[in-house]
Image: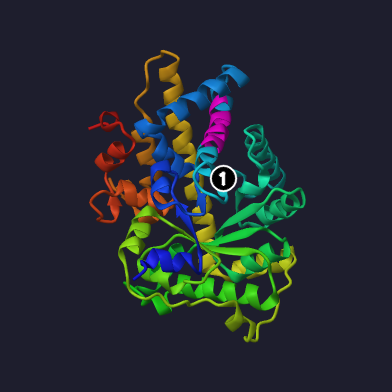
Amino acid sequence: MNSLYEQLSNMTVVVADTGDIKSIEKFKPRDATTNPSLITAAAQMDDYRDIVDSALKQSHAEVGNDLEKVVDRAIDRLSVEFGKRILGIVSGRVSTEVDARLSYDTQATMAKARQLIGYYEQGNIGRERVLIKIASTWEGIRAAEQLEKEGIHCNLTLLFGLHQAAACADAKVTLISPFVGRILDWHKKHTGRDSYPATEDPGVLSVTCIYNYYKHVGVDTEIMGASFRNLGEILELAGCDLLTISPKFLTKLREGTETLERKLDPAAAADQDIERLSLDEAGFRSKHAEDQMATDKLAEGIAGFSKAIVALENLLGDRLAQLEGREMVHRAANEVFGIYDLDGDGVITREEWAGTDAVFAALDTDGDGAITPTELAAGLGCAHCLDE
């Protein structure tokens, strides 16, 4: 009997949601996606120290002694370097994220995307193998629309509602990433329910709705379900164009042998009665305001991804100081913990984290749903950095 992983791979493109090159080598997905929080985790591993140091040294040589500029350049080069190494393993594409703090700035988003693609092309990587990951704000969608016209393909992330998906389709973006688990989180919090069966999971229903809309109206934009809380969500979306899955769930799929039924099918979607949406800016903003879940989760996601950038900046700043022979300021773990521990209760919950789910799971070593200072310090490879 074929494993669940093999069966799923026959109907859906499996993407590895990790920046850990060893995990990608193990599972050999077609595509891979990464972002600053994943890179932050990977960059703390001894195996990748050479990548970090090379990016810092090259950036320092290019921009001089301005720490902020050096770190900003190093993050871009580090993202691309990880991307290049991943592309040496996978046969398809890698997603590389634009700084989330630019999510409401169309021009700045386009400039950063062009810069990232430029670095890839300097490394002899064609733009057809790279997806630039941009938040699904109105401004981000407009940036993606222009970038697509330039042959720069985009992955619109932090997508929670049909209005965002419809606007992305109209902009002819290459791919969208609706966040299944975060939708579930919101509904559990606001309904008081502890769980949902997979067939009733709000995140699953949202992606199913988007899938049927796209296939019914003939949209070419690909759908990649993301951010999973349980295996049932993944199995219930079998047949989706792509699914980006953390190593934890990839392992479970490899171990499972039950028969997998295809749940999403373009032929079934074609038979449905679905009307195409046409949204200008006013219409988009009106629909977004009406969707409290999408409003909350988009804002929360941008804030979380922005925090991940700040954490990475701090870590790279400290590493640069060490490389230059100055005394290293052991602020990294303290500052990262303070950024995420919003209520100051001494632990970081999944809701406070608001960053990448795969990184939260990796840091939460005892699986109790909360990251302690000790767990964070260990994850950053500097247990001695935290104040007692």
Residue lying at the far front in this picture: please name it. 1
Q: Give the vertical position of 251 relative to 319 (above or below).
A: below
Q: Which residue is mark 1?
A: 96
Q: Is residue 366 left or right of residue 298?
A: left
Q: Is residue 193 left or right of residue 209?
A: left
Does the magenta portion include 73? yes
Quadrant occupied by the C terminus: top left
In x, y percent, where is residue 98?
59, 44
The quarter of the displayed image where residue 166 is located: bottom right
Q: Main secondary structure of the magenta part?
A: helix
Answer yes or no: is residue 93 visible. yes
Q: Which residues are magenta?
A: 70-81
In x, y percent, where is residue 136?
61, 57
Depth check: give the residue in front, 179 or 174. 174
The quarter of the displayed image where residue 37 is located: top left
Q: Find numbered disc 1 in the image and state the secondary structure of the residue it sits on.
A: strand
Does the magenta portion include 343? no
The quarter of the displayed image where residue 246 is located: bottom left
